Image (cartoon, rainbow, N blue to C red):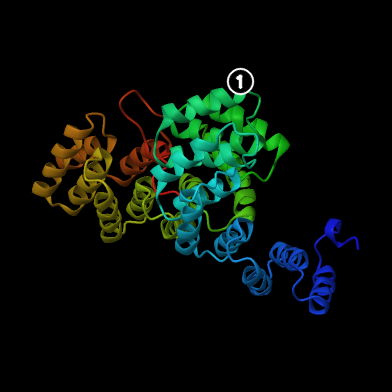
Amino acid sequence: MNDTVAQDTPARLARLQTYVESDPNNFSLLTETFDCALALGELKVAQQYLSRALLLEPTNVFLRHSQATLWIAEKRYTEAEALLQELVDGGVDASAVIFNLAYVKIRLQKFPEGRDLFSSIKGKPDAPEESTAMLLRCVHHLREFDEAFKVIEQAMQDKTLDVSAAGVASLLYLDANQLEQAKRFSEAVLQKDPSHVEALVACASVALAEKNPTRAKSLLAQALHQNDQDGRVWSANALANLLEMNLDRALQEFKLAVTYMPGHIGTWHGMAWCNLLRKDLAAAQQNFESAMALDRNFGETHGGMAVVHAIQGRRLEAEVSIERALRLDPTSLAARYAQGILSGEATDHKAFMCFAERVLAGRAKPGGGSLADLLREPGGRN
């Protein structure tokens, strides 16, 4: 029988099921049928044959790990975590088991635990290929840039930085404001893997910083084709449309972005400025309040709120927000503009449009930044 080396197809699965019915206690056949069903995404069928195998060998480590793998496919992360943790605590040190435990840890938002587990298998010969990329994603979320760059440099020295990990690296360099490195890594990755989402986002974000929204949108369209539920992609695409003053489309995309990535302050800022440009002050205020709920110590949030209050004629509240903004960030463009509104120096629509363009497209400065820079922040990315 050549099924052990055959390609997984529905026909092969049906054939294996026939074999199992003729020999229901054949452990090898049961596991082979499980593997085939899992590969085809037939999760209920896979569970059926795995359960039958577990009745034969309930303590078999391979089968228990397979059960956890199936639960991961079903997104039953809490159950998978408990089983995998039990295996590791019982002395199982196979890198595949530790990798899967680390994976469910980050799916459950337990990033420090995930980082430590991924670090423990880094460099092991039996470590899954995605280990370095997953470790980088973990430290990225934790904003541990120095640690991330050490991992990247070591992998480059060892010639183990694969395409997937290099793509994550491009996004890390972007969020560390190292645009040249981000551009170099992302373009190199896209030459080998044109569909790599993180590299597409990094390359598109560099294009936005270079004031080329057309190229950015072309790259982001490819990223959305790969994953239309990535908040980071929608956020960057919304900014591109905002820069082109496609306000209604930008607003819808910002809303999608915060649906998938509610913890990203820069996206709330982007939506707020979009609503300011649409002259919807109430919505802009709500957006800035959402950003404030995430971090009350962000100067540009207070600065944006000051602009809203100033336009509304609420002088006292505007002055309080300006003071807080400048205390947290003396370079706050929004706070300075709010001062201009209060002083009567920035009252016409043309002046506001010029200012908004500076906020949206401005490049980072020492100690300062812009909305485009805020959208490079990784916080809240799913």
Res 136 seen here: no
Which of the 4 quarters of the picture holds residue 373?
A: top left
Q: Quadrant of the N terminus?
A: bottom right
| Residue extending farthest bottom | 21
In the image, what residue type sits under mark 1? Gln
Position of residue 32 measured from the top left corner of the image (x, y, whole percent) = 76, 63
Nearest the viewer among 220 and 319 is: 220
Nearest the viewer among 251 and 188 is: 188
Residue 9 vertical placement versus 178 (above, below): below
Question: Residue at position x 66%, y 30% from top?
Answer: 188
Position of residue 6 measured from the top left corner of the image (x, y, whole percent) = 86, 59
Q: Is residue 73 left or right of residue 276?
A: right
Of helix, strand and loop, which one carries label 1? helix
Nearest the viewer among 154 and 268 is: 154
Nearest the viewer among 211 and 348 is: 211
Res 93 seen here: yes
Question: Residue at position x 68%, y 66% from top?
Answer: 41
Which of the 4 quarters of the picture holds residue 147?
A: top left
Q: Is residue 317 left or right of residue 245?
A: left
| Residue extending farthest right | 1
| Residue extending farthest left | 316
Position of residue 236 measured from the top left corner of the image (x, y, whole percent) = 49, 46
Position of residue 185 measured from the top left corner of the image (x, y, whole percent) = 60, 29
Query: How many circles with numbers are drawn on the protein?
Result: 1
Classify mark 1: residues with Cα within 10 Å, few (<14), some (14-19) or many (20+).
few
Residue placed under numbered mark 1 in the picture: 157
Residue 338 vertical placement versus 261 (above, below): above
Question: Residue at position x 55%, y 42% from top?
Answer: 201
Residue 328 vertical placement versus 269 (above, below): above
